[in-house]
Image (spheres, rainbow, N blue to C red):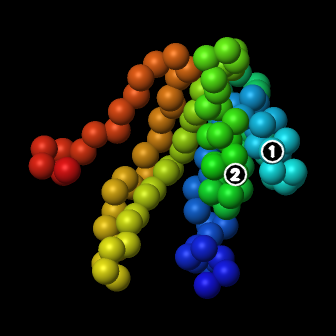
Amino acid sequence: DTNGGIDEENFLDQPKMSVSKVIRKRMAKSTRMSMRSSNVIPGSSSGHLKTISRESFILMYPSVLSELVRTKEEKLIPCDLQFENLSLHVKVNNVETPIVNNITGRVKSGTMTALMGGSGAG
């Protein structure tokens, strides 16, 4: 399996995720991949958000994360993360279980955010 388990037929039909300008620059720099540009996300007052494909996000996430993890001597650059219509399904023993379904939200820089399931969700 050369595509990392990604369903290529339905891949581009998946919702898109948006990231701040800082992360976009780091992603493009660290992966040397061009990103599909689009309009500013509706309802966004800050004109610096762009949309990337799910495929780009998955491919670039490890390098973005490593770029954001810094030593104490280095200055951290704050960034916000916004997502729209995000769904996550986990497949275990050929049984697919939805974890989140079509959620939209924003994680603001400098805040602690947690996504929690119902009681007994594990």
Height in image: 79 above or below 89?
above
Height in image: 42 above or below 119?
above
Nearest the eye: 16 or 77: 77
| Residue plotted at (54% across, 44% down) | 84
Q: Of label 1 and label 2, which has the lower sequence position?
A: 1
| Quadrant in which the N terminus is drawn | bottom right
Mark 1 or mark 2: which is in front? 1
Under mark 1, the amino acid is Ser
Residue 97: percent from left, percent from top: 31, 67
Q: Tag 2, which secondary structure?
A: helix
Residue 24: percent from left, percent from top: 76, 38
Tag 2: Cα neighbours inside 10 Å, few (<14), some, or many (≥20)? some
| Residue plotted at (76% across, 43% down) | 27
Which of the labelled discs sits on residue 30, or is there none? 1
Tag 1: Cα neighbours inside 10 Å, few (<14), some, or many (≥20)? some
On screen, residue 46 versus residue 89, left or right, reads right
Q: Tag 1, which secondary structure?
A: helix
Q: Which residue is mark 2?
A: 60
Residue 106 seen in this snapshot: yes
Height in image: 68 above or below 84?
above
Question: What count of labels does the image hold?
Answer: 2
On screen, residue 93 versus residue 24, left or right, reads left
Under mark 2, the amino acid is Met
| Residue plotted at (85% across, 54% down) | 33
Which of the labelled discs sits on residue 71, or is there none? none
**CB of mark 1 within 8 Å of CB of mark 2?**
yes
Determine the CA span between mark 1 and mark 2: 8 Å
Residue 48: percent from left, percent from top: 76, 27
Image quadrant where residue 109 sits = top right
| Residue plotted at (57% across, 35% down) | 82
